[in-house]
Image (tube, helix red, strand yellow):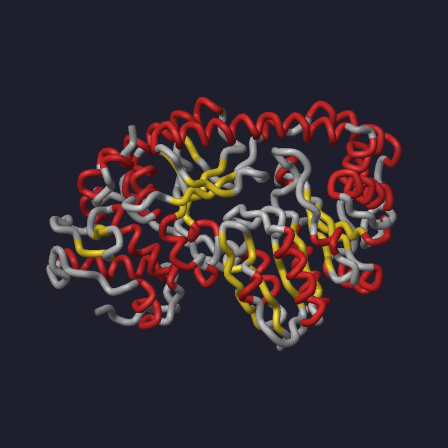
Amino acid sequence: MLSKINRKSAKPLQVQIYEQLQALIVAGRLKPGAPMIATRLLAEQLGVSRTTVLLAYEQLIAEGYLQTRPSVGTFVSSDPPREPFTKRAGTRGDKAARETAMRSDRRGGTAQMVPPAAPAIDFNPHHFDGQLFPLRMWRKLIMPPIERYRARVAFDPPAGLECLRRAIADRLLVSHGISVSPEQVVIVSNRQQAYYSLARRLAPRGSRVVIECTCADGAAKALESQGAELVRVPVDEHGLDVDHLPQGPVALTYVTPLHQYPVGGTLPLARRERLIAWARQAGSHIVEDECGSGVWYRGMPPAPLKVLDREETVVFVGDFSSMLGPGLRLAYMVVPPELVAPMRATKALIGNGSAWLEQVALAHFIENGGFARHLRRIRKIHLARRDGLWNALRRHFGDVKIVGTEAGTHVAWFLPPGFPPATEVRRLARAREVGVYTLYDLVAEECAWCENAKHTLFLGYAALSEHDIRKGVADLAEAIASRASGMGIPQSLRAA
């Protein structure tokens, strides 16, 4: 159906696929109403990732060349445009044409559609409200070390300043029940650096690494970068499905048990115990990623794997991004005693120390109680925004099923039976200047969450006011209602 794509071209692969399919439709070679080849099959034929084909299909859907039919498939529109979109947008490269062009963003190795501008109301799970950063307190914290040291000339320890490592160890005991010495804490610039350091040390080429399916792109890419074989174990709404853990030796296992990313489930105690027992038999270290569970909305969080671990096999990874914003580039690993020296050596090779001023300020912020007060503040604000989102969804869509409400800053909404695919809902929302997200926007294609990915939306609330949350959900409801009759949505499930 398509000619071969040109991998040497500067034009992104999804643009090449889009243009060829668009030309076939405009020329009438793909007839109105004709079924389209499945994205997975076309990806195999062209030798590209399925995400690349999905991006091309989604652009054609957005421009009216293709349409989806729930539980049936994708078809050429019954009345597709009669000329290429670039001609309809204007031949002089006008603003509308430029703003709808597809561009390639290689983030974590995944090609993505990058909108030229964010929608007016954006439920982006990765956004953070910068106004919540404790700026006044932070200024007070950084001035004393600046005055004292002026210009720091000595190299800091690769594992991080002792004052911050001690503060983190003390906080973990209070907040999570994790009892460790400061020597077991290794400071890194971000979680990605932690993943890569652990991959270099614990996942040699040819070894097997277990990861959740689905999980964060960065973790998967870092673990795979050293030549390890990734074994993907499915997740459900409660987290990792331990019934699918593989047999035989495994070098490393990456999990997010407290708040699974991106679905949001919390691994039950029975599964956590089974996971630890399995890891002992498989000879595997476990990387336990805190991943958004730093603020727990109802009572105390469940015991981390690190607390349940009696064999010193668990490495606990955490950061401060969800609590202080992504601009503070500090994270940490808590490693078993036997890994302290190896991980310090690996950290020295990758990055010999971290920014000293931020380390000193953060250590004082934790020690003087300011961090705990800040957490109480953002917990109250995030809880109100989460409840506002939940109530707005119920007001417009009835008894909705959402997961990930216990912690974090986004939820997964399982669309009701009869709704169109999540990609179609996203397109309808974007037309109303509302940004909602599918699994394919958040993770790599090869980690797609089985069939659930097609019917799950992800909505972040940390960066939106309660007013914008209510308006965004109302606009989303109107967008779905405007197409309800043509999309097979039952009357009882249409937006109120």
User: Residue at point 49% right, 25% down?
Assistant: 465
Total marks shown come to 0
Q: For residue 122, what is the image quadrant?
A: top left
- Between residue 344 and residue 24, name the one nearer to us: 344
In the displayed structure, 274 sits above or below 281; it is above
Whether residue 120 sits left or right of residue 203 in the image: it is left
Identify the image quadrant of residue 134.
Answer: top right
Q: Is residue 82 visible?
A: no
Name above or below for residue 319 compared with residue 228: above
399 displayed left or right of 355: left
| Residue placed most toward the observer, 415 or 137 | 415
Query: Which residue is found at the position 34% from the left and 67% from the top?
Result: 43
For the N terminus, the image quarter is bottom left
Residue at the location (49% across, 40% down)? 411
Q: Position of residue 492 (x, y in %)?
A: 26, 35
- x, y percent for residue 115: 39, 43
Query: Does residue 316 appear to the left or right of 456 in the view shown?
Result: right
Relative side of 205 to 154, left or right = left
Write the residue at 46% across / 43% down: 412
Q: Position of residue 101 (x, y in %)?
A: 32, 48
Residue closest to the eye, 391 or 86: 391
Image quadrant in which the C terminus is located = top left
Residue 306 visible, this orientation: yes
Relative image position of residue 252 (x, y in whole percent): 66, 66
- Give the image quarter of residue 133: top right
